Amino acid sequence: MLRIISIDLGTSNIKGAFIEFSDSSMDVNIVEQVNIRQKHIEDKVGGIHEHDPRYILSNIEDIIRHLSSSHGKPDAIVLSSYLFSTLFMTSTGEYRSNIITWVDERSRVVLDEISRYGSELYRRTGCPPLHIYSLSKILYFKKIYPPIISNNCYILDSKSFLMNYFVGYPVTDYSTASGTYQLLNIHKLRWDDLALEIAGIDEKQLPILREGDFSDYMRTGITMKIGIAEKTPVVLGLYDGAAMIYGLTGGRDRIAVINIGTSGMIRSVLNTPVTDESGYMRFQTYYFYRNTWIPGGGINNAGIVLNYIADLLGMNIENIVKNLKEYSSEVYRNEKILEDAPYVIPLLYSERIPPLSGMGLNIIGLKPTTRLSSLLGSIIEGMVFLLSLFTESLEENNIVFNEVRLAGKIASIPLTPLMISNMLSKPVKYTDIPDVSHIGNALIVLSSLNYTSRKNIEKLIENNYIKHGVNPSPGLTAILGRRRAFMKELVKGFSLFNLSGNL
């Protein structure tokens, strides 16, 4: 029996899980999960959104201490963490800033300095010129607070920040580096010369780069503090979304993964790095794991829109989900009821892709006979529509996939896999496990410690976690195809989607 503690540092929650792997049954079992709400430091007027690194470390220590005292000392600890985070730290370990998250808006003011190199940077790093990446934050702080960034300053992400604390030096995995900095060359897997020149920094100020299955022993002082055994390996892991993708695919290519929770994303595992040939940079391509890449994109407007509707109507989210599940049953019995549903373009909050920002929550075709459940169903449809725009751009670049695997809180609503399968005309498989990132983390540990092969990992996933499926039906595919075409025209009419390719 192999015992693993998985830590998943998210933007909203700090999550931990105690996991057991049985050699005999080839099963990964989550024994206990712990979630702690993340502490935000924010000023909405000033566009500030940060996390306190000390708060994060204190809570992760508490999670490890609790799980190990409750279930036994772990044989390994594995980390996944969120993208787009930037922390400035001295070489002696003093934090010069909090962790600046992707929600932070301050660095928008320097985007023009990056955009002039946008196409070449995108070709090298897979990252379009967006303010969420560390490159823009580096330029912003150099301009506004130059003392923060000096020659003895490390520029860390959420993963290297954790590894520096636990093993004593800053090291990050390629997936986290690729999706965070806009500084990693996705073809050569090293810090990019042009990006470093634009940032005006030396690569010595950045973390060491390693694959996600790299491990080192936790520092003795920390093991004593949190009550685990000396020589406990800390496995580097992937970023949180990549860990989820690994937990659903085991690294197999030609499978797209969709996650729909508070936000949403679609990415497809590929054996070669591909960027958008149209010149419009409609998707990002990040490095994944062991010579694979994950092109795709994310949306901000997913479950957060349902939360807004719940607050607006004075309902709790459980009632919203109950309405949606009842409506799902109706659609499964009679798919034609969708023809009379309203159209919803759920762009309530600013999107990560600029042309889709500022539109707001648009509802078209609301009638006196429209029920709340139908409106909520159309919001789900709108989320899937936004994700389908990425699918279209991927296919135009010959990135094809044969199957979709689905995870996230909204995935548990039966309408979601039905909408995805029929709007994308692909079979969809999904799991009941709410936090697949923990499964992905555990599988990375098995690979790191040579417990099993990649083929066995794929079999383990197929046999244990992918238990449900939906196939497209001709009637519903036709209905949703017509509705998608109409929504696309609506967005085009608002001048927010350029059909020539600028998503």
Image (cartoon, grey):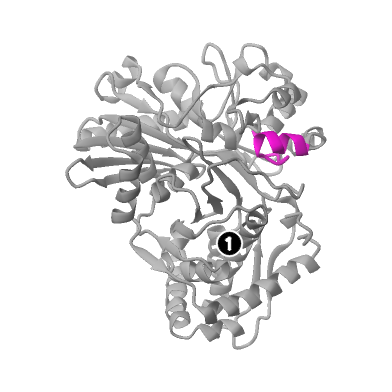
Front position in the image: 75 or 388: 388
Q: Residue drawn at (68%, 53%), measured in percent from left and top?
A: 350
Q: Identify the residue position indicated by label 1 in the image.
A: 305
Q: Where is residue 239? Give x, y as percent.
A: 49, 38
Q: Which residues are magenta?
A: 118-133
- Give the percent coordinates (x, y) of residue 272: 57, 41
> Residue 450, relative to residue 169: is it above or below?
below
Residue 273 x %, y %: 60, 40
Element class at badge 1: helix
Quarter location, residue 229: top left
Residue found at x 48% / y 86%: 334
Q: Per the image, is 132 magenta?
A: yes
Q: Amino acid at mark 1?
A: Val
Question: How far across and down, in percent of the image, does residue 462 sit?
Answer: 33, 54
> Residue placed farthest to the bottom in the image?
369
Q: Quadrant of residue 321?
A: bottom left
